[in-house]
Image (cartoon, rainbow, N blue to C red):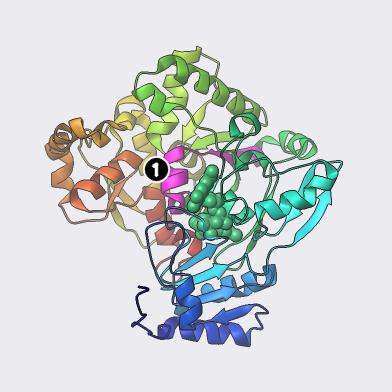
Amino acid sequence: MIPALTDLAASAPLYASFLAKLRVRGVAGELTGGIADRTVLVTDNSIYQLRPEAVAFPRDRDDLVRIGTLLADPRFSEMRIAPRGGGTGTNGQSLSGGLMVVTSRHMNRILEIYVAAKTVRVEAGVVKDQLNRALAPHSLFFAPELSTSNRATIGGMVSTDACGQGSCLYGKTRDHVRALTCVLTNGQVWTSRPLGAEELAVVSAWPAPECARSLVLVQDAFTTHYETPLVLALLGLLTDLGFRRWLAPFLPNGKPLHVHGFLRAFARQAGRKARMLKELSASGIGLVGLDPSMTLTCRAGYVAALGAGAAAPVRIVQEWLAARLADRPTAGPARDYLLLPHCTERTNAAAALRDWHVVFASLGHRLTILPSGCCGMAGTYGHDAEHRATSEWIYGLSWAAHVGCAGHLLADGYSCRSQTRLIDGVGLPHPIQALLGCLHPPGRSTRIAA
Ligand SMILES: Cc1cc2nc3c(=O)[nH]c(=O)nc-3n(C[C@H](O)[C@H](O)[C@H](O)COP(=O)(O)OP(=O)(O)OC[C@H]3O[C@@H](n4cnc5c(N)ncnc54)[C@H](O)[C@@H]3O)c2cc1C
């Protein structure tokens, strides 16, 4: 028997007020806090259920901008939001107990097909089979395959990097995205696309001082995929400090292969990444990584696998910042922070720890680096069940006591932050997040740092 719905609660006041304000701002699509609409969107193709407080069916990009702009209003800073395409995700990704923004109802227009360039411009809610029906008369097709192609949308496919049968030959969704225009949660419209050859030539001809104020962020799998707000915080801080930043295309650096001893596979992956880094560094702009351990893999690890000179130098973020902020006049009020650094950084790039001092001092703050060893996670070591007890024992040698102490404690290693969360339930911020927080105290915070 189908269970009766008994909980017919109206939208929470915050969400009801948000919808009312959106209506005044002229959103063209439907906005609803109705129980029926909210209930049918409780599930996707996962085992999870979560009822949204409100649902929006935007008609176009302008509607999304209206939603994002209103979200930036501090009165709505507690709201949660999730986009939804076809709702075919298997992990509950599109479910939300907040505002659900459904693109598949209206934003499903195929805008232009450029047959000669084999390129198509679509809205995010276009369904994969719909796109291929439109492309078929031109003997073209959108290659990434997935079993739910009669419901899954391009927005959902991009977000999940969908792939399936045929992907070994044709690649994943990410291999077919030429450009993305996104509406951020502050209403800003942001277009991301690779630089063309002409633009690259212009960048390569920049004078040295201009190059020195620019960097290319070399993404790593951990911060990009599991700590995206940290990556956004770095981009936000760099902007606030007046630097120009570019994002290198994501390419794995092979570290997990290395730590598990697959050295030949590591060398192959390292070779691919090293080639990309060399091409990027030819522009004269510095390459910078966020996670110390992942970044150091591109240094010592690549030299060992490929030989000296095979890879372009990648700096850890504080190494790059310290060289540019050292002469900056300090600004107050000063705050005190304590840093638990990644042990690989301590052993393989000790000078980079001093660079954190320079960066904090340049921005008017004080940093103390605590005496600590390995947190016990050691890459993926602590994730293996058979290593867990030893991993926790290692944590107890130095980290446990520090994490239990008062003070603004920071950690710059992804694996270390994972370990403190696992063992003590403490989420330590990265130094970059602390610095951005100083520039944007509560009440003035930007969503990019949230
Ligand atoms: C039976 C079955 C078979 C499947 N087979 C495959 C397969 O072969 N290969 C595969 O890769 N996947 C497969 N999936 C998973 C799923 O179909 C894909 O992840 C698909 O890409 C999701 O698309 P969607 O439009 O349904 O996204 P949704 O489920 O609606 O959302 C997925 C994620 O994308 C985000 N999102 C959606 N639209 C946007 C947008 N416009 N902007 C930003 N973020 C957005 C959502 O917030 C959510 O995080 C399968 C699922 C099922 C149930």
Give the prevailing secondary structure in the magenta stretch. helix
Residue 388 horizontal/vertical position (percent): 18, 35
Which residue occupies the foreground of this view, 396 or 251?
A: 251
Mark 1 vs ligand 1: CB under 8 Å?
no
Residue 202 visible to the viewer: yes
Residue 318 horizontal/vertical position (percent): 43, 40
Q: Which residue is mark 1?
A: 358
Residue farthest toward the front in the current orientation of the protein: 1
Task: Look at 36% across and 30% down and name the residue there.
Answer: 351
Residue farthest toward the top in the current orientation of the protein: 307
Residue 195 horizontal/vertical position (percent): 72, 41
From which residue to which does the magenta span run? 209-231
Left or right for 233, reference 336: right
Q: Residues within 10 Å of mark 1 (few under 14, many from 20)?
A: many
Three-letter amino acid code of the residue under disc 1:
Val
Position of residue 113 relative to residue 253, above or below, is below
On the rendered image, what quadrant is the N terminus found in? bottom left
Residue 163 horizontal/vertical position (percent): 57, 41
Which residue occupies the foreground of this view, 240 or 246?
A: 246
Q: Quadrant of residue 304?
A: top left
Left or right for 77, reference 277: left
Task: Look at 39% across and 61% down and name the residue there.
Answer: 332
Inspect the magenta stretch and tell me whether residue 12 lies in it: no
Question: At numbered mark 1, what does the secondary structure look like: helix, strand or loop?
Answer: helix
Q: Quadrant of residue 162?
A: top right
Position of residue 112 relative to residue 11, above or below, is above
On the rendered image, what quadrant is the C terminus found in? bottom left
Task: Look at 47% across and 85% down and name the residue there.
Answer: 16
Position of residue 45 relative to residue 391, above or below, is below
